[in-house]
Amino acid sequence: VSPKGKIIMLYQPWNWAYHLGKDALGGNTSQSKISIPIEISNWGFLVRKGDTLYTYKGQPYCDISQTDLYEKGEKWKIFNNSPVEYFATYSEAQYESVKKLKNLLCRLYAIPDVLYTKGYSEEVVDFRGITTHTDFRKDKYDLSPTFKFDKI
């Protein structure tokens, strides 16, 4: 889902793709085969150096004064020995499109419209509903803790 809310389908529904990655709880292959990934285009966490926020790739993202482009959250995970607490914002168009897409997929595939809230835990393997990468892998940073699930 692009920042402007455009939904791009990369695979036909009868195909599947590895999307959880190595060391995913329950195994990358088995969990990827039984889940539907929705990727939301977003830089995720940002690293502050002085008054500039940078992407994890080291590219300047915005000035600290541009508060509409980021959110400051609780100190979360560690990246390069520093706690992560700044996150790129998701657009309203993204929230609207993700909500429509989630509702459609839940209806088409009888997926319970319930959010997994226990974080990284073996319990996610048997859960049926809405999950994120961070529920399956400790080293993933998406979705950020500032994502507003109540909007979807």
Image (spheres, rainbow, N blue to C red):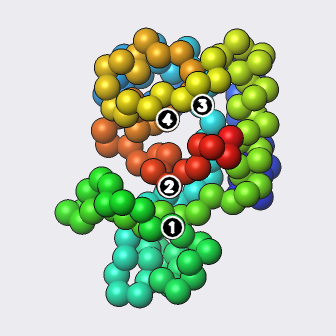
Q: Quadrant of the C terminus?
A: top right
Considering only vertical position in the picture, is 136 above or below 144? above
Earlier residue among tags 3 and 1: 3
The residues tagged by marks 1 and 2 sit, at their Cα atoms, a distance apart of 7 Å
Please state which of residues 130 and 44 is positioned toward the viewer in this rendering: 130
Q: Give how far apart the Cα atoms at labels 3 and 2 are.
A: 19 Å
Q: Amino acid at mark 2?
A: Thr
- Return the disc, 2 or 4, that comes first in the chain's sequence: 4
Which residue was labeled with disc 2?
Answer: 146
Instruction: Give, as a three-letter code, the residue at label 3.
Output: Pro
First of labels 4, 1 by sequence position? 1
Mark 1 touching mark 2, by CB under 8 A? yes
Q: Left or right of 25: which side holds 3? A: right
Q: Disc 2 on helix, strand or loop? A: loop
**What kind of residue is marked 1?**
Glu
Residue underneath mark 4: 132
| Mark sitting earlier along the chain (4/3) | 3
Residue beneath the point at 56% across and 78% down: 67
Q: Is residue 111 visible?
A: yes
